[in-house]
Image (cartoon, grey):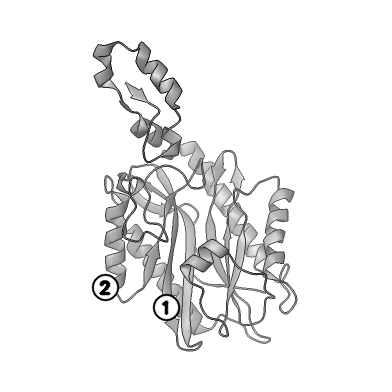
């Protein structure tokens, strides 16, 4: 007899104490021993994506990518004039103009050679101050939209060229490639029935063995932005996540493949953090990105 009670998932923990006590008071004593949490059923229902949903989801992720591409272009950004916060509000307005919605307030942040890398706590807790975008800046956004009961969550990078500069500097392209490598090591570790904590541990060990400095904080994605299902790390829990990190990975589930790699860039004499997030899907055929992934830094032009 499954009840809506759970220690690890709010979506499976909706039964209030008063109703529980009333239910138990009317339940025959011989049935009381059969009471269990209905968490597995609730989580499975929420995390499973249907084929129809995935068709719509792929289109929605494409829309998300298209909006980011426009935001990180000369149509929106004028170096030396446009601020990071103006790009944020352009994203909000663009979404509304398209009849969509956002499930979280977007962020646009900047890494440049003259400023120290923010700590994880500062970046994730305090956010970023409004800053005028300048040539030579490495831009990063965190952005997602909602439509038809589905949610996207995406992080990408762009570079603001100096006058006459035609391509992203090689040192930044190499740094970006390290982020893609962490993605590959991580998603190659996926497996049916494996827990999020075991996948996290394997991927981090592989990355560190290659001299990378990865951080992984991937979450289920779909009906909710941060949905129920297998959690694979948190930015402040790289040793594993209690409860949801022990949930086994199932087929037909979607994830926000969210992670970063910190790499020292001699040209800037500082650490740079490549922060990536793309929608991914796992089924009997293995893992795939829902609508591809960013494999090179965008050029603002």
Identify the residue at image location x=41%, y=71%.
261
The N terminus appears in which quarter of the rendering?
top left
Residue 185: x percent and y percent? Answer: 33, 64
Left-right relation of 299 to 98: left
Residue 145: x percent and y percent? Answer: 60, 50
Q: Marks 2 and 1, how far apart in space?
A: 15 Å
User: In this figure, what is the number of numbered marks?
Assistant: 2
- Who is closer to the viewer here, 260 or 30? 30
* CB-based contact (under 8 Å), mark 2 and mark 1: no
Read off the residue under disc 2. 209
For residue 173, above or below residue 20: below
Q: Is residue 195 visible?
A: yes
Left-right relation of 172 to 230: right
For residue 197, above or below residue 170: above
Identify the residue at image location x=73%, y=72%.
82
In the rendered structure, which disc, 2 or 1, sits on the residue that comes first in sequence? Answer: 2
Residue 28: x percent and y percent? Answer: 30, 10
Q: Is residue 295 visible?
A: no
- Who is closer to the viewer here, 25 or 284? 25
Identify the residue at image location x=45%, y=27%.
16
Element type at mark 1: strand
Q: Quadrant of residue 26?
A: top left
The tag on residue 116 is none
Q: Quadrant of residue 238?
A: bottom left
For residue 232, above or below residue 86: above
Identify the residue at image location x=51%, y=63%.
124
For residue 203, above or below residue 160: above
Read off the residue under disc 1. 263
Q: Residues within 10 Å of mark 1 (few under 14, many from 20)?
A: many
The C terminus appears in which quarter of the rendering?
bottom right
Q: Residues within 10 Å of mark 2 (few under 14, many from 20)?
A: few
């Amino acid at each position: 007899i499954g009840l809506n009670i759970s220690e690890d998932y709010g979506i499976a923990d909706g039964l209030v104490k008063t109703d529980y006590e009333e239910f138990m008071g009317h339940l025959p004593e011989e049935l009381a021993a059969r009471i269990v949490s209905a968490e597995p059923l609730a989580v499975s229902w929420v995390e499973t994506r249907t084929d129809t949903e995935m068709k719509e989801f792929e289109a929605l992720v494409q829309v998300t990518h298209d909006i980011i591409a426009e935001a990180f272009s000369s149509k929106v950004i004028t170096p030396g004039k446009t601020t990071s916060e103006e790009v944020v509000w352009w994203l909000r307005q663009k979404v509304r103009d398209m009849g969509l919605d956002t499930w979280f307030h977007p962020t646009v942040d900047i890494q440049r050679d003259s400023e120290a890398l923010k700590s994880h706590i500062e970046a994730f807790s305090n956010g970023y101050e409004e800053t005028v975008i300048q040539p030579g800046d490495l831009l990063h956004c965190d952005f997602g939209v909602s439509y038809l009961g589905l949610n996207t969550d995406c992080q990408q990078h762009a570079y603001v060229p100096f006058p006459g500069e035609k391509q992203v500097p090689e040192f930044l392209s190499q740094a970006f490639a390290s982020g893609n490598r962490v993605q590959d090591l991580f998603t190659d570790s996926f497996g049916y029935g494996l827990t999020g904590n075991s996948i996290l541990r394997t991927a981090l060990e592989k990355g560190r063995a290659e001299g990378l400095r990865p951080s992984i904080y991937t979450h289920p994605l779909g009906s909710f932005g941060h949905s129920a299902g297998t959690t694979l790390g948190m930015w402040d829990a790289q040793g594993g996540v209690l409860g949801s990190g022990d949930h086994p990975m199932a087929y037909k589930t979607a994830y926000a493949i969210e992670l970063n790699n910190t790499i020292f860039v001699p040209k800037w004499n500082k650490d740079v953090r490549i922060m990536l997030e793309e929608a991914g899907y796992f089924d009997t055929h293995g893992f795939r990105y829902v609508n591809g992934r960013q494999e090179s830094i965008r050029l603002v032009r």
